[in-house]
Amino acid sequence: MFWMWGIYNLFKNGLLNIIRTATNPGEIGEAVLVGCGFMAVIVISYLLGSVNWALVISRVFYHDDVRDHGSGNAGTTNVLRTYGKRAAVFTFLGDGLKGVLAVLVACAIFGYPMIVTEINGLHHYDVRYVQLVTAAYLAATFAIIGHILPIFAKFRGGKGFATFLLSALVLNPGIWLILIAIFLILVLGAHFVSLGSIVTAAFYPILLSSFDSVYTQYGIATLFAFCMAALIAWSHRTNIKRLWNHTERKTYFFGQKSKDEGEKTKTQKDTK
């Protein structure tokens, strides 16, 4: 079941466990230790998320601000339309990998082996392992928040989908395959990146509650997945309005140039 549960199962001993072994804290000390761990995850993940690669690439390589072009959004799609595919690929990877890094940091802090006890036919997990998984999902959520509302860019960021998508990959590799299939079908079929992003994120809590039985009884993963989906929907609120009004711009990843040229030629002919 590793393919469903995610990368946090690779971490058998985290920073908090090392501190516990060295200090042997009591109940109050344990509560303070865990609280500090969660605060560290929140702060580090948010700061990592605030590093917006669309802005980095546009400023370093093009001496420009991508937010001054197109939709005004600092994200992969606007980079694609403004600077081209190569810049868009690096933007997507940079914004996505910071979500991965945030999850890895959370796992490094809270790492603990999975211990399962069966009581009355139900599986119960060690509280410290539950804290580990909670920290992993918390990290992904705050990395997305950092991307959407980055402190380093006056809280004008991107939509958060790249960060969400690669975070989902390390959290639930099996479910991620379903998510990426949904996204590709919608984007390559309808050519609306915003629609694919919103629907894909919306399916995440549904898939987790349906297939990931490890935390169904706790609801941790589903709760955070719902928060991620809500954040993606909120960041796409203007896109939702344009989709509703049939004014949303389509994106063609293959043959975009020929498509645009064809439409331009048609417009010129109609004008004559």
Image: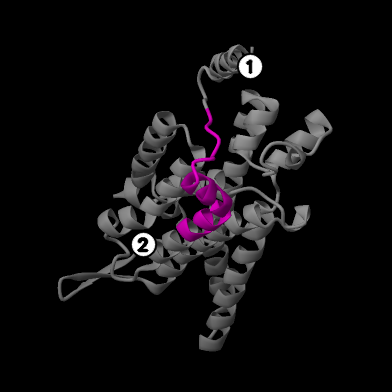
Q: Which mark is residue 271?
A: 1
* Outermost front residue: 272
Badge 1 amino acid: Thr
Q: Is residue 272 above or below residue 151?
A: above
Q: Residue 218 sits in which quadrant?
A: bottom left
126 horizontally vs 121: left or right? right
Residue sitting at 59 percent across and 49 percent down?
159
Q: Which mark is residue 219?
A: none
Residue sitting at 57 percent across and 43 percent down?
96
Residue topped by disc 2: 114
Residue sitting at 70 percent across and 43 percent down?
72
Q: Is residue 186 above or below residue 141?
A: above
Of the residues under marks 1 and 2, which one precedes in the sequence? 2
x and y, in percent, of residue 22 in the image? 58, 73
Distance (Cα) linking label 1 and label 2: 68 Å
Tag 1, which secondary structure?
A: helix
